[in-house]
Structure formats: structure tokens, C-alpha cells
Amino acid sequence: MKADIRYGKHNVSFYRTHPVRGLLAGRVSIDVFGDNFLPAYTHGDNRDVVATDTMKNFVYAMALEYPGATHEGFDLSADAVAAHRGPGDALCPAQREAAESGG
């Protein structure tokens, strides 16, 4: 059976201040989709489901770990880590809104 199951966490606001790297702030939305989530609905098997609070915490952790100061670099860094997710699911291009630092 093929199903188009999609869910996510939207408008996760974050900011990071750092004495050298400066301010990095923005808003991120994460969507995951794929038919591998079907067992969660048909058999109560949540092994392939990522909790939406985990998605939010992922954004916060990436903002803290990111060594750079640009939004473009943050996007690439977060996308690279997200690419190592479990097999079978797909990550939609996240929508991001950047808050520029007032340099």
C-alpha cells in the first residue's frame, strides 16, 4: 500500500548569541513524509516516527553546534545532518526565515 503521510513541526523560532560568531536567529519549519509511517497508523508501530518535539530540539541543537555565522551555512549544516535520518523517509525542504544580525 502506498500512502502520502506527512507531518512536521512548523515555525520553530531560535536564536544564538556568541561573543565571536555573533547573533544567529531565524524560524524553521520541518516536514517529513513517506509511506514508511503507515505502520504507525495501521499497527501502532512508532519506530519510524520522529516526535515533533524532537524536531524542535534538533533545530535548537543545530543552532548551538553550528560554528558559522551565516544563514546559508546553517541551512547546509542542518540539511547535511538531517540527511542521515532513518531509511525510507524524506525531508521536505524546510522553510526558513532569517533574522539578520544588527552588525
Image (tube, rainbow, N blue to C red):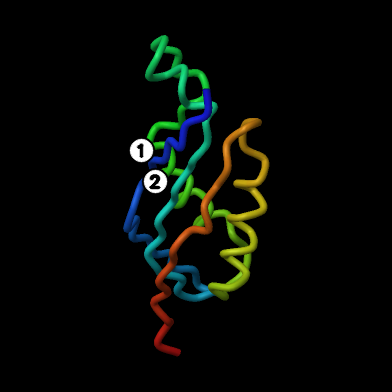
Q: Which mark is residue 56?
A: 2
Residue 61 lies left or right of residue 14; in this view the side is: right
Residue 13 pos. (x, y %): 33, 60
Residue at left 42%, top 40%? Answer: 6
Q: Residue furthest top?
A: 43
Displayed quadrant of residue 66: bottom right
Count of all numbered marks drawn on residues in the image: 2
Task: Give the class, few, some or many, for how many residues have Cα within 10 Å of label 2's Cα (few <14, many ≥20).
Answer: many
SS category of the residue bearing label 2 = helix
Q: Quick one: quadrant of the C terminus?
A: bottom left
Where residue 9 sits: x, y (%)?
36, 47
Classify 3 as above or below 46.
below
Position above or below: 22 against 60 = below
Q: Which of 2 and 95 lies nearest the eye of the viewer?
A: 2
Give the residue type at disc 2: Lys
Judged from this view, the residue extending furthest toward the bottom is: 103
Residue 28 position, x and y percent, is: 41, 60
Residue drawn at (48%, 43%), measured in percent from left and top?
32
Is 78 rendered above or below residue 1? below
Query: Mark 1: few, some, or many residues within 10 Å (few <14, many ≥20)?
Result: few
Q: Amino acid at mark 1?
A: Asp
Task: Please name the residue that numbered disc 1 is placed on.
Answer: 53
Question: Which of the two residues, 27 or 86, is positioned nearer the viewer here?
Answer: 86
Residue 99: x and y in percent read: 39, 77
Q: Which residue is rendered at x = 57% and y = 64% of the image? A: 75
| Disc 1 + disc 2, Cβ < 8 Å | yes
Going by the image, does 64 lie left or right of 15?
right
Q: Give the left or right position of residue 28, taking residue 89 as reference.
A: left
Corner quadrant of residue 84: top right
- Residue occupying the point 59% across, 73% down: 72
Q: Secondary structure at mark 1?
A: helix
In the image, 41 versus 23, the foreground residue is 41
